[in-house]
């Protein structure tokens, strides 16, 4: 590798220069200090999030004893799991359809699929409110988790386009000759899809799953308009708690949520990473 | 060798393929015989790939029939045809090992157990990749990936192997090596090969028979040497190799000789055979550069005598360009009448390069049997 500077041998060596380091530190502060504050104060023994009094785990104990918070948490995870599964299937099939076929009005379909991504969330929320009030009144007396149906449907509506867009982008790099090769070797349409297309889509499917899951887990606006008194999700619950004051209990609950998201992301990245590495090294 | 009775393996009957209003293949009829190494040759956009894809089943003919082994395959899907294909990009499955790639075509059609590994090992041995079974495609070179694609197709024991521009992605040295390897492989296993290429050298070097395609139609179907020496049209003469093309009028057409007057040439062209053309009609004379003979032109000395009657087939000119290509040199000669002719000379000795120099006055002549006369 050739560079002009005598000390710099690798691109990463530029990290040793102070302006680069300073800007890195700045970005890190900007991104992570609020989160660190939130996590730190979840261990604060004072009721108020202003001064540090001492270390305690009481707030975590309180979170685990707060049944309505736990119920909201359970609702959120359930909604996220179901809506993610549905979004990935629906989004992947939409992507394959848009990639594979030519049909009249394809441009229009492609545009409308992306619409929920750009429509302001508040509009989506109101639309959902009206939809479930007038068109598809969701009975509120159904047993759990069926009573979450309205929220799940709303979440699928706004998350499957993200999956579709990600998978569609991945499909653009697919070599059609792979599909033809499989056909040529005796595979029927289903085997081609399963043996060649799905493995190619896999990175897109994993990113899509992650996106859909996190979008669903932390959605507030749309959920707020579709949830009822018995179907409160974690963000909605936190909002109602915050209306009085931000207690360390909220901090503790939020920290747990961050932990779950980070762990899930790490797992997903690891799955994706090992796939990528196996593709390169064996 | 005793003549082997030939059996038609692929019969293409009046096949037309239209994409919208464009005719990619226009009423082509062609028989390919068992055991042939058949090349579809032509410039890009001539329809050769479409024809190959119709044999594979990826395109369906708009009109006409396609028979493989006497059975109508016109509308049979690709996975049910007894042919296999090597793709231009090789299309080796990136997420599978070499072994799994080759085994795919067997497993997907229900072959199981030890037969899979036996046949895969056999196919990998055929392309000399015995030790590469556990590798992933991205650990292979381009040439090795192509061998995987070959093994993957051959393991199915197809009646016909189709190859779509198989050598175009390889570098020049490897391409030449794969050329002879493909030809040897075909000889060894005896499967009919149909190859699509735009590279005339490739087709001439490997194929036992070539079809030259132009604008969706077959221009000429012949052995490589017949294509080169007896082209049936200006297009073929020009497409295969390099040629001096001279337009002229047929002024004498007898059984044993013919004479053509070219406006741009101040001597008539003499041929030692008759031409079945109308006297006075326009014809084109194609003379290959290597059949041209150069001689030094010295003031006062008579022109060299070819086997044509005096005053025919010899022109005075000056060397205006020399391309030295190592084994051969190509001389461009500007004739006194203003026509540029090319002559190709071998460089058999190490001093031959200096035989002719730039701006040197020369005679350029050709024997009476050298010109091919083209009517279209």
Image: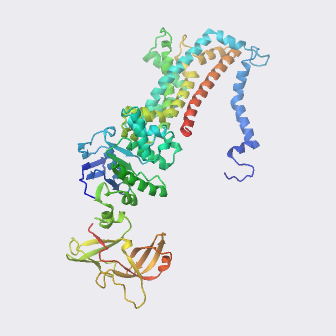
In this view of the protein, can residue A106 be seen by the observer?
no
Query: Coloring scheme of the render?
Result: rainbow
Residue lying furthest right: A53
Residue displayed at 65% across by 11% down: A64
Q: Residue at x 24, y 42 (%)?
A: B72
- Observer able to see residue A17: yes
Task: Please count the marks in the image.
Answer: 0
Q: Nearer the viewer, residue A102 or B291?
A: B291
Q: Could you tell me residue A206's position as x and y percent?
A: 53, 30
Give the x, y percent position of residue B198: 39, 56
Q: Residue at x 37, y 75 (%)?
A: B292
> Relative to A172, is B182 above or below?
below
Quarter of the image with the N terminus of chain B is bottom left
Residue at the farthest front position: B1
Residue at the bottom extreme of this rendering: B300
Residue A102 relative to residue A123: left or right = left
Task: Give x and y (percent) for residue A27.
Answer: 70, 35
B213 lies above or below A253: below
Closest to the observer, B58 or B175: B175
Q: Is residue A193 above or below residue B323?
A: above
Locate residue B135, reporting x and y percent. Answer: 51, 40
Rendered residue at 50%/15% (across/down): A148
In the image, taking residue B267 as reference, residue A161 lies left or right, namely right
Front residue (pair A111, B195):
B195
Is A214 rendered above or below residue B285?
above
- Image quarter of the C terminus of chain B: bottom left
Foreground residue among B292 and A166: B292
């Amino acid at each position: 590798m050739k560079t002009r500077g005598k000390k710099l041998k690798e691109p990463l060596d530029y990290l040793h220069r102070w302006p680069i380091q300073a800007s890195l530190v700045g970005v890190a502060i900007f991104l992570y200090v609020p989160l660190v504050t939130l996590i730190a104060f979840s261990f604060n023994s004072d009721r108020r999030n202003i001064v540090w009094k001492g270390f305690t785990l009481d707030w975590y104990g309180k979170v685990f004893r707060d049944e309505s918070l736990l119920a909201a948490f359970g609702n959120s995870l359930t909604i996220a799991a179901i809506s993610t599964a549905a979004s990935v299937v629906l989004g992947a099939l939409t992507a394959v359809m848009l990639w594979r076929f030519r049909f009249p009005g394809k441009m229009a379909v492609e545009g409308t699929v992306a619409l929920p991504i750009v429509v302001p969330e508040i509009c989506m929320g109101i639309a959902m409110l009206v939809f479930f009030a007038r068109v598809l009144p969701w009975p509120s007396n159904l047993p759990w988790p069926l009573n979450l149906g309205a929220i799940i449907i709303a979440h699928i509506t706004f998350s499957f386009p993200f999956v579709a867009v990600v998978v569609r982008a991945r499909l653009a790099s697919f070599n059609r000759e792979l599909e033809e090769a499989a056909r040529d070797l005796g595979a029927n349409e289903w085997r081609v899809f399963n043996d060649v297309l799905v493995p190619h889509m896999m990175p897109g499917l994993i990113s899509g799953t992650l996106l859909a899951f996190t979008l669903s887990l932390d959605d507030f606006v749309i959920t707020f308009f579709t949830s009822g008194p018995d179907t409160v999700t974690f963000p909605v619950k936190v909002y109602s708690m915050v209306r009085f004051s931000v207690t360390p209990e909220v901090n503790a609950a939020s920290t747990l949520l961050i932990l779950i998201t980070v762990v899930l992301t790490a797992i997903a990245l690891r799955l994706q990473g090992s796939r990528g590495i196996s593709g390169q090294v064996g | 060798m005793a003549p082997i009775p030939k059996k038609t393996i692929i019969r293409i009957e009046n096949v037309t393929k239209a994409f919208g209003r464009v005719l990619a293949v226009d009423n082509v009829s062609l028989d390919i015989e068992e055991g042939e190494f058949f090349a579809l040759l032509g410039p890009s956009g001539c329809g050769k790939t479409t024809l190959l894809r119709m044999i594979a089943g990826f395109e369906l003919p708009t009109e006409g029939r396609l028979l493989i082994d006497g059975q109508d395959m016109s509308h049979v899907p690709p996975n049910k045809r007894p042919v296999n294909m090597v793709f231009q990009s090789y299309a080796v499955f990136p997420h599978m090992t070499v072994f799994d790639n080759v085994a795919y075509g067997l497993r997907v059609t229900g072959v199981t157990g030890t037969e899979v590994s036996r046949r895969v090992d056999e196919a990998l041995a055929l392309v000399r990749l015995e030790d590469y079974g556990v590798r992933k495609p991205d650990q292979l070179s381009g040439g090795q990936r192509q061998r995987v694609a070959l093994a993957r197709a051959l393991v199915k024991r197809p009646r016909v192997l189709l190859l779509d521009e198989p050598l175009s992605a390889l570098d020049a040295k490897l391409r030449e090596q794969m050329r002879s390897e493909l030809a040897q492989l075909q000889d060894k296993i005896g499967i009919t090969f149909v190859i699509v290429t735009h590279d005339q050298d490739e087709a001439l070097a490997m194929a036992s028979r070539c079809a030259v395609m132009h604008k969706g139609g077959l221009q000429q179907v012949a052995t490589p040497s017949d294509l080169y020496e007896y082209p049936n049209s200006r297009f073929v003469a020009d497409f295969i190799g390099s040629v001096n093309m001279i337009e002229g009028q047929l002024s004498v057409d007898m059984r044993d000789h013919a004479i053509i007057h070219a406006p741009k040439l101040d001597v008539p062209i003499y041929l030692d055979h008759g031409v079945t053309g109308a006297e006075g009609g326009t014809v084109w004379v194609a003379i290959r550069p290597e059949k041209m003979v150069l001689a030094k032109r010295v003031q006062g000395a008579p022109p060299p005598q070819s086997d044509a009657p005096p005053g025919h087939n010899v022109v005075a000119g000056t060397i205006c360009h020399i391309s030295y290509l190592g084994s051969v040199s190509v001389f461009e000669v500007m004739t006194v009448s203003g026509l540029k002719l090319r002559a190709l000379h071998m460089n058999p000795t190490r001093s031959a390069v200096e035989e002719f120099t730039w701006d040197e006055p020369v005679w350029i002549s050709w024997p009476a049997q050298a010109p091919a006369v083209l009517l279209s």
